[in-house]
Image (cartoon, helix red, strand yellow):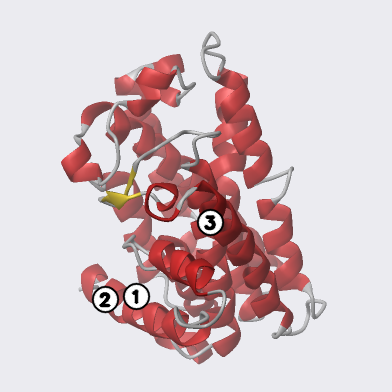
C-alpha cells in the first residue's frame, strides 16, 4: 500500500536540502534581505507544489521513479516553491490582506518590516526564473518551456490577476463567475503549472501532458475550495493562520456563493475528476492519486 507520509517526508527532505544549498546564505550581503527570504522559505509549509511537480515527473515513466531522479524536475520544483513563497509574502502585506500569521509564525512584514518583505518577495520571484534559466526542457519542448509555463501561471493572466480580482471583489455581492475566475487564477494556475512542469521536465508527450493538465485543473480548484471550507470551519491553531478571515474581510469565496455543503460536494467531485484521468499515464500514479485525496481531505 502506498504510504503518502513516507513519500512526502522523503521529497520534502530533498526539497528543503536543495533550497538550503541554493538560497543565498543569511550572512551574505545584504544580510537583512537574505535572512528575510530564508525566514519565509523555511517557515514551514507542506511543499505541496514542488512535490506535485516531482510526482508528475514520476507519472511519466520509470526513469523518474520516486520523483527524485530527474534533476530538471527538481530545479523546476524549487523554482515553483520560491515563487509560491513570494506570493504568500505579498499576499500578507498590509496593502493586500494584512495578515499577521502564516504557517503558525508571524508574517514576514511583522518580523522584518514592510519594505524588507516587499524586497524579499521581489528577490524570490526573480530568483525562481534565474534557476529555471539554468535548465533546458527536454524534447519535444523548446528549451525555455519551463520558464514559459511558470511565467504564464504567475503573471496578470495567472496568480497576479487572480489576486487583483480577489482584492477588487472584497465587500461585493457574491458572484459565481468572479469566484471561479479568482480560484482558477490566484490558486489553481500555480498548482496546474506545478503538475505540467513536472511532466514537461520528464518529456511527457502531448496526450500525457493533457492528462496532467486536466488533473492539475481539478486539484487546483479542489485545493481552493478546501481552503475556503477550512477558513470558515477551522481554528487559527489548526490552520497556522487567522481563521474566519475571509468572512471578516468580505471575501468572495465558494462558500459565500454556494454554501458550505455544496462546497464539500464540489471538492469531492473535483477529487474524483482528478483520480479518473490518471490511469492513462505511463508511470507510477499512486503519488498523484494520494495527493489528490490529501488536498481535498486535509484538516489544515
Residue most toward the top? Answer: 173
Residue 35 position in % (x across, y down): 44, 70
Quadrant of res 199 = bottom right
Locate residue 3: give its quadrant: bottom left
The reply to whether discs 1 and 2 touch (Cβ–Cβ < 8 Å) is yes
Could you give the CA–CA distance between mark 2 and mark 3, rounded to whole angstroms?
31 Å
* Left or right of residue 250, residue 239 in this image: left
Q: Secondary structure at mark 1?
A: helix
Crowding near pointer 1: few (<14 within 10 Å), some, many (20+)?
some
Marker disc for residue 116: 3
| Place of residue 102 in the rendered image (x, y in percent of width and height, measured from the top left) | 34, 48
In the rendered image, the quadrant that contains the N terminus is bottom left
Is the Cβ of the residue at disc 2 closer than 8 Å to that at disc 3? no
Q: In this orientation, which residue lies closer to the viewer: 227 or 23?
A: 23
Q: Tell me where residue 84 appears, x and y as whole percent.
A: 52, 58
Q: Is residue 202 left or right of residue 191?
A: right
Q: Which mark is residue 98?
A: none
- Can residue 190 be seen by looking at this rendering? yes
Amino acid at each position: 500500500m502506498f504510504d503518502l507520509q513516507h513519500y512526502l517526508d522523503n521529497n520534502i527532505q530533498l526539497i528543503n536540502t536543495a533550497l538550503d544549498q541554493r538560497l543565498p546564505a543569511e550572512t551574505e550581503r545584504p544580510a537583512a534581505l537574505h535572512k528575510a527570504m530564508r525566514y519565509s522559505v523555511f517557515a514551514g509549509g507542506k511543499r505541496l507544489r514542488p512535490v506535485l511537480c516531482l510526482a508528475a515527473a514520476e507519472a511519466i515513466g520509470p526513469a523518474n521513479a520516486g520523483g527524485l531522479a530527474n534533476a530538471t524536475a527538481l530545479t523546476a520544483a524549487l523554482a515553483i516553491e520560491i515563487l509560491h513563497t513570494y506570493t504568500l509574502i505579498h499576499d500578507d502585506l498590509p496593502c493586500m490582506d494584512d495578515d499577521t500569521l502564516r504557517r503558525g509564525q508571524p508574517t514576514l512584514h511583522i518580523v522584518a518590516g514592510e519594505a524588507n518583505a516587499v524586497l524579499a518577495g521581489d528577490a524570490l520571484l526573480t530568483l525562481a526564473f534565474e534557476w529555471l534559466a539554468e535548465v533546458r526542457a527536454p524534447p519535444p519542448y523548446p528549451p525555455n518551456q519551463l520558464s514559459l509555463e511558470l511565467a504564464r501561471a504567475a503573471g496578470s493572466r495567472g496568480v497576479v490577476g487572480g489576486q487583483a480580482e480577489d482584492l477588487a471583489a472584497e465587500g461585493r455581492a457574491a458572484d459565481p463567475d468572479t469566484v471561479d475566475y479568482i480560484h482558477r487564477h490566484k490558486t489553481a494556475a500555480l498548482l496546474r503549472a506545478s503538475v505540467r512542469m513536472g511532466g514537461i521536465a520528464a518529456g511527457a508527450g502531448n496526450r500525457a501532458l493533457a492528462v496532467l493538465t486536466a488533473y492539475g485543473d481539478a486539484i487546483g480548484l479542489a485545493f481552493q475550495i478546501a481552503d475556503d471550507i477550512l477558513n470558515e470551519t477551522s481554528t487559527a491553531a489548526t490552520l497556522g493562520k487567522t481563521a474566519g478571515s475571509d468572512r471578516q474581510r468580505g471575501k468572495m469565496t465558494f462558500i459565500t456563493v454556494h454554501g458550505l455543503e455544496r462546497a464539500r460536494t464540489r471538492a469531492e467531485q473535483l477529487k474524483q475528476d482528478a483520480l479518473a484521468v490518471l490511469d492513462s499515464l505511463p508511470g507510477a500514479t499512486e503519488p498523484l492519486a494520494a495527493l489528490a485525496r490529501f488536498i481535498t481531505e486535509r484538516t489544515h
